[in-house]
Amino acid sequence: MFLADCHTHSVCSPDSNVPMVQMAQKAVEYGLTNLTLTDHCDLLSIEGERELTYDWNPVLQERKKMLDAFGTKLDLPMGIEFGMGFLFPEAAQVILNQPGLDFVIGSAHNLSEEAGGRDFFLLDYETLDNCYAALDNYFQSMLKLASMPEFYDVVGHIIYPLRYMNGDYPTPPSMDRYKDQIYEICRRAAEAGRGIEINTWKGQTLAEWGPVLDLYRQAGGEIVTVGSDAHAPAPLGRGVKEAYQLLQDHGFRYVAVYHERKPEMIRLK
């Protein structure tokens, strides 16, 4: 069975300490066909400071070790998760000109600079009002991101901030109020020939993607990648098989992987 985990992280991300070769070893053990390491490059730091350059050398060094060990056993495209690139187009273009880059996930991990620029991970979600204030800001950024397709191949984890909203609320935060914005994000991506991803968050979010997939289909979208967002070997690949079934349940016939910034459509079985 074809299995691809297209959103994973290694020691080249600031929030992981796992060598790429260990991630590849786990991918082989799990039975993956394709493993795309998409280490973080965020143009705003976790505290909201501008970081407008990126050193590819650690990635290339790690990739060489991984390819030497597993290049004949796995398809190993070179990816990046590119955060807030839409804010700084000149810097973004320089970073993404790296030769050999296969896949770019476009993400918004931070509040807008006007709102302080901090990562959503750091915010206070004690009340529903706080949750919706964060989500309002997030979807404004995501709309801007979707409008600049030169800086992404797929729109990353559209429902991202929800993973941090675990307070004791009268009712859980709902995506219903953002349906129009999500549709517009999907429409802009689809019309530009770009995709979205199902981010299973280590197998913890699956059903939540159903409404997003429906909106993406309504917008004419067909390109969907699947990723676990694993930052360590243990959760690698979690939820991928279930996400493939979810795609089929919502009318999709293919899952995508990327090489040379172009989607390869793999028929679901």
Image (cartoon, helix red, strand yellow):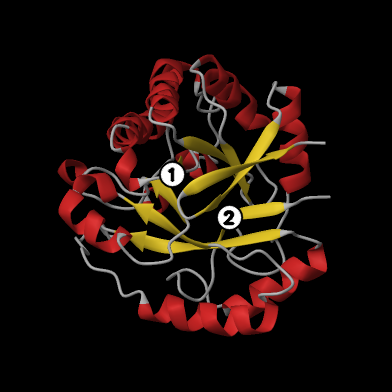
Number of callouts = 2
Question: Which residue in the structure is indicated by mark 2?
Answer: 229
Q: Amino acid at mark 2?
A: Asp
Classify the position of the C terminus by image quarter: top right
Residue at 24% from the left image edge and 50% from the top image edge: 117
Question: Which residue in the structure is indicated by mark 1?
Answer: 153
Residue at 68% from the left image edge and 45% from the top image edge: 204
Q: Is disc 1 placed on a helix, strand or loop?
A: loop
Mark 1 touching mark 2, by CB under 8 A? no
Q: Sequence order check: which comes first, mark 1 or mark 2?
A: 1
Q: What distance separates the C-alpha of mark 1 from that of mark 2? A: 16 Å
Residue 247: image location, x then y, percent: 70, 30
Q: Amino acid at mark 1?
A: Asp
Front one among 168 and 172:
172
Front one among 226 and 165:
226
Q: Is residue 180 above or below residue 260?
A: above
Q: Is disc 2 placed on a helix, strand or loop?
A: loop
Residue 252: image location, x then y, percent: 68, 26
Of tags 1 and 2, the one toward the viewer is 1
Q: Quadrant of residue 69?
A: bottom right
Q: Is residue 151 above or below residue 221?
A: below
Residue 213: image location, x then y, percent: 59, 25
